[in-house]
Amino acid sequence: MNDLKNKNIIVTGASGGIGNSIIKKLNETGANILASGTRVEKLDSLKKQFEKIKILKFDISQSDKIEEFIENATKELGGNLDCIINNAGVTRDNLAIRMSLEEWQKVIDINLTSTFLLSKFAIKKMLKNKSGKIVNITSVVGHTGNLGQANYTASKAGIIAMSKSLAIEYAKKNINVNCISPGFIKTAMTDKIDEKYKEVILSKIPSGRLGEADDIANAVLFLSSNQSSYINGETLHVNGGMYMA
């Protein structure tokens, strides 16, 4: 993906396992990367691994400061923005009748509303360049639903529909907006899944294994590059065949 060399890219949720792999893959292309997250020690670790990248601590739940974040991040990258990877998100799992309004609202606010705002203010920057790429990380459960995740599944399904609308609005401005929908990926989150439930999950995956963070990072690389220039408003499913659209 040589066309990513010197491209200015923001990655949110960079301090997690998938975010780490995305940073690594993008760094290999020679892109200019700004890694953002909430865990300073993880961001510092990324900076030690990949000296060229820039880091900026930011909590995307601060919706009133997202425009300022995009402004500061773009300045750190030199004044232009070519791509944003919206990878940050949270879960607050509970059965529907036990789910509090706070649990519902927090997940919707961070996963959906903040992703919209990050995309909105990124688009404003991209319009100046007359081009841009937005890659939103959603989830297989945004298509299938999942026990105890009414809030999370709603937020991820919302991202998909929102991305389609943004793609329609800005396609003529040469801005591509697409989603990646991971299945069950080996991360700190899936490590906590009970072994019996993990066996049930594996039985539903034709590939017979959980995905790797690199599987998602490779998809990000493709949708960030010019090789996907005629793909817009789509969702790339990376789930080992667990769900086929």
Image (cartoon, grey):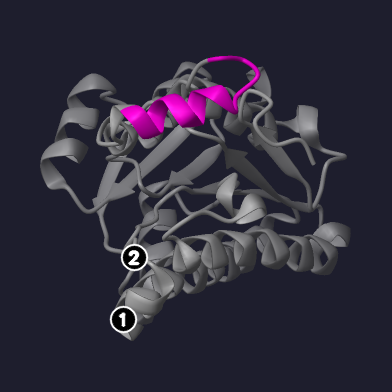
Q: Give the number of the disc on residue 100.
A: 1
Q: Are marks 2 and 1 in contact (CB under 8 Å)?
A: yes
Amino acid residing under circle 2 = Asn
x 42%, y 73%: residue: 96
Query: Which stretch is magenta?
Result: 196-208
Residue 100 seen in this snapshot: yes
Q: Judge from the rendering whether residue 193 lies leftward or rightward of residue 130; answer left or right.
A: left
Amino acid residing under circle 1 = Ser
- Tell me, yes or no, whether the highlighted magenta stretch contains residue 159: no
Tell me residue 35's x, y (percent): 34, 42
Q: Judge from the rendering whether residue 69 lies leftward or rightward of residue 40; answer left or right.
A: right
Please tell me how crowded label 2 is: few (under 14), some (14-19), or many (20+) other residues with Cα within 10 Å.
some
x 32%, y 76%: residue: 98
Tell me residue 87's x, y (percent): 45, 48
Q: Give the number of the disc on residue 94.
A: 2
Q: Quick one: SS at disc 1?
A: loop
x 54%, y 49%: residue: 84
Predominant secondary structure in magenta? helix
